[in-house]
Image (spheres, grey):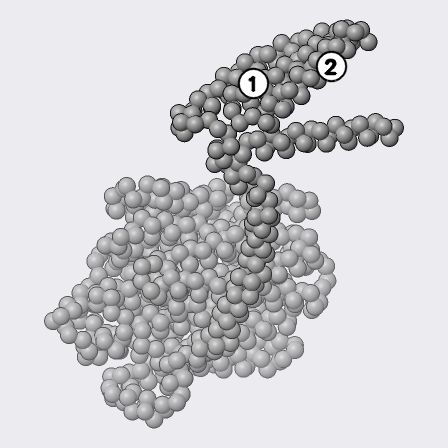
Amino acid sequence: MEPIVAYSLVLSAVLFTMGVLAVLARRNPIIMFMGIELMLNAANLAFIAFSRHLDKLDGQVIALIFMAVAAAEVAIGLAIIVSIYRYRRDVDVDAVNVLRG
Amino acid sequence: MDYIYLAIALPLLGVLVNGFFGRRMPRKAVGTIASLVILGSFVVSLVAFLGYLAAEGGTHTVTLLPWLSLPPLEISYGFLVDGLSLVMALTVSFVSFLIHVYSMGYMADDDGYPRYFTYLNLFVAMMLTLVLADNLVLMFVGWEGVGLCSYLLIGFWYKKAAPPVAGIKAFIVNRIGDFAFLIGMFLIFWLYGTFSFTELRQSVETVALAGHFPLTLIALFLFGGAIGKSAQFPLYVWLPDAMEGPTPVSALIHAATMVTAGVYMVSRMSFLYSMTEVAMLVVACVGAFTAIFAASIALVQNDIKRVLAYSTISQLGYMFLAAGVGAYWIAIFHLFTHAFFKALLFLASGSVIHGMRGEMDMRKMGGLAKYMPHTYWHFLIGAMSISGIPLLAGFFSKDQILFAAFTARPDIWPNAGMVLWIVGVVTALFTAFYMFRQIYLVFLTKPRFDVAEIHPHEAPASMIAPNWVLAIGSVVAGFIGLPALFAGIIHIPNMFQPFVASAVAGGVHVAEAAHGAQELFKEVLTTSISVVVALLGLGLAFYLYQVRYGTTEKLKKAFAAPYRVLLNKYYVDEFYDNTFVQPGRVLCEQLSRVVDLGVIDGVVNSIAFVIGAVGQVLRPIQTGFIRNYAWYISAGAILLVILLWLGLAAK
């Protein structure tokens, strides 16, 4: 395995873990959202690293598709957060539990 | 005549037109269309009849379309044209046409006018299907179809209380008979592998199974259907209640045509019945018993239509009596003449009810001959015909039934003929009495109602005209089937017998019976006794209701117990109610409580309860906090990774 691939994978794992922690630990939805983005991009990085390792283009293609999907997801996610804010004047996620069973 | 199916198609066309557009058309148009399609049916039947005569016994089948093809079961829309089906088709379409015309007057002010004519046309289509079908299954379609129309028309005035109940009663009682009929059909298919009448006849006549037990069983099961449809004891109870329907319906369906379906069926299957003496004897005995049983009830009834209803049951009994002693053509002959005079009597009683503003109780009538001269004559001609006054239609047919019974000598009970004959003669006495009792009570005695208030009036021309046609038929219809005795005197040969006899089995001994001096003596004897009995009944009615008017009240007191039994129709309805209806109701209530509410609802509710309980347990997991869900996802992911790792490590 080339060193650059190995480093990229380690970086990917670190980024992913940071994203998970951000989602689990923070109560601000914007920050949580950034954590999710971080996880997505960590996965992208892993795809590209493997693409290089396996000498195939598929991983890079998937990374490009992911970016497009992530852009759409950001648009929807931010719209939901703005709606919640307009409705409640507050965006603390622990205060929003209307889907409780 | 390959276009015989038009006889069925035309009324069906009338059903479609009146059923879909009747409410948007003027009443005149509805009634005219309905009557014209029936006239068309009659013309088609007539053309077929003439073609049949020209072709010298041109019995043939017309297969229109295949219906079911499930080898070995092959059923088609096929029609059988022979003497029997032609007589039936002509009678049905002709009487129906007259009754359609009469109905245009009788129902003129009814709200359900288009609906009425739609049902009536559908009935004629179904009845013609029944009589023209060339196989048992298609016949059964007509059989059930007329039952349906009967149900619809009995309950025609569905806003009143009694008619719908009577309709349901008729339908259910008929179903009991139909159940037996179906079993008979299945047995036939099991034994012979065909439903076609022609093939069946060949099989039955070639395979020697005479007196064979399954054959008897089939005949008895089929007769069960006839008992229901033709209102014989013990399934006759629906017919008197069927009088809740409009009177023309009583005339058409419950007197002239539908109720004769059973007689037609027995004659159609005569090749089978002739093979089994036991079944024949059962048919004859049930017929004879019903004849005298119903006639005795008719003696004391007060409702003008109920008397006629019981009279119909009694006359149907005569027909089965004739069929049971092997005189199928006479059964059909009586069916033919009966269609005229019974339709006439019912329509005339309809005119009476119409002119009396719906009054049906004969105790509140009297003296109507002055107000309704035409109707009086109609009723009188009908009554004389049914009572067997010489030279009228009913005399010839009934006389031949009694003669056939007199000469019958079944091997298993040689004296049966004599017993049946005596029962028949007593019934004839009853018949003459109750008919003329009715004439006196309705038309001749002093009015027992307020003339100034009710203003009895004669029926309109559209109702009188068809009655005159029927009245003429009631007088002359008998002359086409004269007994040998009269045929010899008036030199009119019996045309009816050879025509129908070609299509039915047996009856040979009756045909031969006319020969020989001894037979001639017997015929003179039975005929004279019939005449004497008819006149005796007439005279008794004359004495009780004219000469000694009021004697009946004393008689009622003197014979209080038998009178009450007769008035309450032998308590048969009460008996059925206590034995079958009420236990059935209790059973159903228990079933609904225990099985329906307990078992079925219980199972469904239990499932719902279990699902609810599980939901209650799982509810707390759904906290609604987004971070909890994120934890679950992460924890799940980590768990998966660990499992994967363990799996890899194990390898």
Q: In this view, does B266 lie to the left or right of B297?
A: right
Q: Residue B233: tell me if it is visible.
A: no
Q: Earlier in the sequence, mark 2 or mark 1?
A: 2
- Is B492 left or right of B514, judged from the image as shown? left
Q: Name the residue under label 2.
A: A10
User: Dot 2 lies on which element?
Assistant: helix
Residue name at image x 66 percent, y 9 percent: A61
Q: In this view, does B194 lie above or below B3?
A: below
How far from the left and from the top, in percent, is residue B48? 47, 47
Above or below B436: residue B40 = above
Identify the image quadrant of the C terminus of chain B. Answer: top right
Q: Position of residue B526 (x, y in %)?
A: 47, 79
Please indicate whether residue B550 sits to the left or right of residue B182 in the image: left
Amino acid on which the number 1 mark rests in the picture? Met
Q: Residue at x 64, y 45 (%)?
A: B74
Residue B606 vs residue B46, the one in the foreground: B606
Name the foreground residue: B171 vs B11.
Answer: B171
The quadrant in which residue B182 appears is: bottom right
Q: How many labels does the image show?
A: 2
Q: Residue A34 got which mark?
A: 1
The answer to whether any part of residue B417 appears in the image is: yes
Which chain is disc 1 placed on? Answer: A
**Where residue B303 appears, x then y in whole percent?**
31, 73
What's the residue at 68%, 11% (across, down)? A45
Q: Which residue lies furthest to the bottom in this view?
A: B558
| Residue furthest to the left | B452
Residue B534 bears which disc, if any?
A: none
The amino acid type, in three-letter code, at marker 2 is Val
